[in-house]
Amino acid sequence: MFCVSLKDLSSPERTTHLPGDVHRSGKAQKENICTALPSLADPLTPTDPLTPVKHTGDTPLPEPWTPTANLKMLISAASPDIRQMRQRFLALYPDYPQDNVSISLDEVAASLGVERRRIYDIINVLESLTMVDREAKNRYTWYGRRRLHARLGQLQRLAQQQGCSPAPFEDGDGAMANRKDKSLRLMSERFVSLFLVSESRSITLENAARLLIDQQATSHSKYKTKVRRLYDIANVLTSLALIRKVHVQDQGRKPAFQWLGPVHFRPPGVAMAADAQPGGVSHSDLEARRTDHSSFNAPPTRSTAHRLVNSAPCSPTSRPAAVSQQPLDCSRHAPLDLGYANEAGSAPSLHPEDDSSPNHRLAYLPSLSQPSVVLLYEGQRCWAQPSHYLYVPRETGLNNINFLLSASQSAAGLSLPYLLIPPSPLGFLSPAANFLVGEAGPYGPPGAELGATLVPLPPPSPEQSETYDLSKPRPLTPCTPKEATPTLRGSGSFFQTPMTLDSVVPAAGGRRKRGSAQRRLDVGHAPASREPITALGSPTRTRPHI
DNA sequence: CGATCCCGCCAGCGG
DNA sequence: CCGCTGGCGGGATCG
């Protein structure tokens, strides 16, 4: 793994040390034993590398609030290279780093001229997205967005499965954190999950706060505190271009957030070759699962295929660790939302393709770049016994599968459960030559010679059941008292979706500029609407960039 | 005045 | 014990 000291990122011309450097440099240097620079070839360069600062108007600078602030101001004014340094920061933290980048909180804080405390907030949100991972004290690994997609799919599946709040957080050693630690991280997970299971992909701040608030936290002050935290999280997510701030129409200034990130995710652990993210790291999802340490992840198992077929699609988090079955391999509902614009490279999920037919809708399962078995389920429950196997041998050259779906059901929110399995553990399925789809044709494109076979599921033999457990009804969540306990008071479900807003409008761009955490760490590659750059060296609060 | 978020105190924990 | 971590909420700022 390549490590880079943020000190190394400082330009040679940067001669001014920030406050933190003074007393932390010694330790920081000791910690930075790796010096290889990460690749700078990442195409995702910041669109706005400069540092917008809080508008202070034309008034003269006020007296410094604190000695620290004063020092920061002086440093900022004295170092016109600070913006360039931050620009380099952005360039050095690519969205899809080829090698893991080790970062030190001390150095981040010092280099960016902010308190450590500020870094923790952002780090926690990034951790919830598996964009960073805690390596050791004061040291984190930067993964960028390599694992983000998998993580979002993970959060979505768990939200769909559990219908309640995620299980308690586990730290890197698997130890449960009983205290209120990691609450921001957990809150971030929940907040993101709300979007991922919401049909409208939007949620008001108020709703989010109420849904995310602790059971007992009913007081107004608790609510306000929660809102503060939501702003912290939302600002990071906004910088990541995962959400944007909107306002609910006809409700005054009621703030809301709209999800901008992906909402369709491939079934986990399958079709890895289809992972065509910019970095081209096809194993990223596996890596994500292997290294994830959140409560959503079970310990790694021996083989993806094995756990694929062994896994119950539901109840992922609360099995005893020793027998934990990887929940991430449970493919399930592929939401079909007409008009969804799939992000490049993400797949396979089912996408509606054609609703021109009055009787059918065409959806497709893209990126079948390896021989696969698709399990089709009748109804909406993939934990029931699958109705058919669809085996897709490699030699067919089949890259995707089209499905004709009954148009009787609204495509919006339609879920077609399926399970995509690499063929290795399923050799008992004999491939056949033709694409045969069962009882209720027509299926597939006209004249399709897809070279795949849809095989009615044979009755499970005991051996198969024991080995692959394909036909056993998947246990339904919740499986633990914890999971069985509804988190939301009186609702029985943490995720009360869809939380459709009547209508939302984009928040006035630049009205209030960007959020604090957003300003603190420019984690994102900014959306188009950024506030104008103000004067260099303004005595404002600094805003670090990643 | 509500929305937003800056800021730092301080508790808990681990090395 | 001390530094790291982060929960928390007062209060400033903005529109």
Image (cartoon, coloured by chain):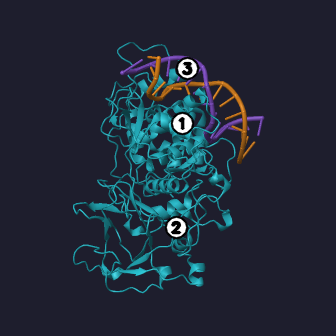
Chain colours: A cyan, B orange, C purple
Is residue A517 something that shows in the picture? no
Q: Give me the residue at 38% from left, 43% from top.
A: A241
Is residue A341 something that shows in the picture? yes
Report the chain holding disc 2: A
**Lower sequence index among marks 2 and 3:** 3
What is the crowding at mark 1: few (fewer than 14 residues within 10 Å), some, or many (at least 20)? Answer: some
Report the chain holding disc 3: A
Which of discs 2 and 3 lies nearer the camera? The answer is: 2
Say the numbered circle drawn on residue A210: 1
Q: Position of residue A370 (x, y in %)?
A: 38, 75
| Quarter of the rendering containing residue A469 | bottom right
Left/right placement of residue A295 relative to residue A249 reads right
> On screen, A403 above or below A534?
below
Q: Give me the residue at 38% from left, 54% from top.
A: A413
Q: Whole-Å distance between the Cαs marked 2 and 3?
A: 61 Å
According to the image, label 3 marks what residue?
Answer: A67
> On screen, A182 above or below A338?
above
According to the image, label 2 marks what residue?
Answer: A383
What is the three-letter code of the residue carrying label 1? Arg
Report the chain holding disc 1: A
